[in-house]
Amino acid sequence: MKPIVHKSHRAAIYLIFMLLLLFVLVFTIFYSFKILGFTPIQIIIITFFSLIGANVNIPIATLRSKEPIVMLKSYTIFGIELYVPFYSYERVTVAVNLGGAVIPVIASVYLILIHINMLFSVLLSIIISSIFIHAIAKPVKGLGIVTPFFIPPLFAALLGIIFGGSMAPVVAYIAGTMGSLIGADLTNLHKLDRLGASFVSIGGAGIFDGVFLTGLVAALLTI
């Protein structure tokens, strides 16, 4: 029996689906930042550097690993390439993710400056968010510091509702992004040399946790 959908048609369907998904992602980011008070040109800059910067990590420090790191060494035997794991005490490169750390911090500082009258509420929300996220963040050997996927944005939304009033989306965005970076990454810097990973990125989850999810949840507060 012949397949109902030809392979070339299936590839076209996948491509269309991915383009639609990308369109929804970009549209949602645009809408989220528009709600937060950014101008169109600022939204374009933030969106572009967030999407591109999600895969850009800027090295800032090098640590000596206190845990063995699993490395792979390749051998070619009779034309077959084999990979053999071995342990090594290599140096740990600590980097800052452009899309998941640098851009959200710049956006948060900008929002704080244009809503300086909300400074006390914003700082209180950041402190509470950082403490909460630090409590749920877990170090994962070979990977880094991780947090549950949806909890930080939802908790930030709750803080926005409690402390933000009419500016709930702004407070939620700042508390979510800054709370994640401080609570999960910065307060766990002393653990990075014990993770058994050769590379650790601050804000490495990139656009999803730093911009997309928190920005989306913040925008939904206006509905």
Image: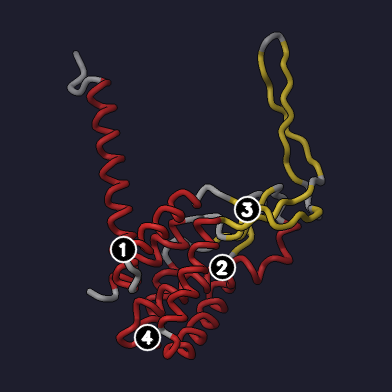
Residue 171, compared with residue 90, is above or below; it is: below
Check the picture and name the quadrant holding the N terminus: top left
Q: Are marks 2 and 3 in contact (CB under 8 Å)?
A: no
Specify the label residue 164 is tagged with: 4
Q: Give percent across and percent down for residue 47.
A: 39, 56
The quarter of the rendered structure image containing the C terminus is bottom left
Q: Position of residue 214 (x, y in %)?
A: 40, 67
Circles 1, 3 touching at the beta carbon (< 8 Å): no
Question: Which residue in the structure is indicated by mark 2?
Answer: 181
According to the image, label 1 marks what residue? 40
- What is the CA distance from the residue labelled 1 to the residue labelled 3? 27 Å
Q: Which residue is mark 3?
A: 58
Q: Residues within 10 Å of mark 1 (few under 14, many from 20)?
A: few
Q: Which of the pair 25/183 is nearer the observer? A: 25
| Viewer-nearest residue: 223 or 23 | 23
Which is more foreground, mark 2 or mark 3? Answer: 3
Residue at 30%, 86% (x, y): give it.
Answer: 166
**Tell me, what colour scheme is on the image?**
secondary structure
Mark earlier in primary sequence (2, 3)? 3
Q: Amino acid at mark 2?
A: Leu
Q: Are marks 2 and 4 in contact (CB under 8 Å)?
A: no
Question: How far is the residue under mark 2 from the one under mark 3?
Answer: 15 Å
N-terminal of the pair, mark 4 or mark 3, is: 3
Helix, strand or loop at label 2? It is helix
Among numbered discs 1 and 3, the one appearing first in the sequence: 1
Q: Give the structural element (helix, strand or loop) at label 4.
A: helix
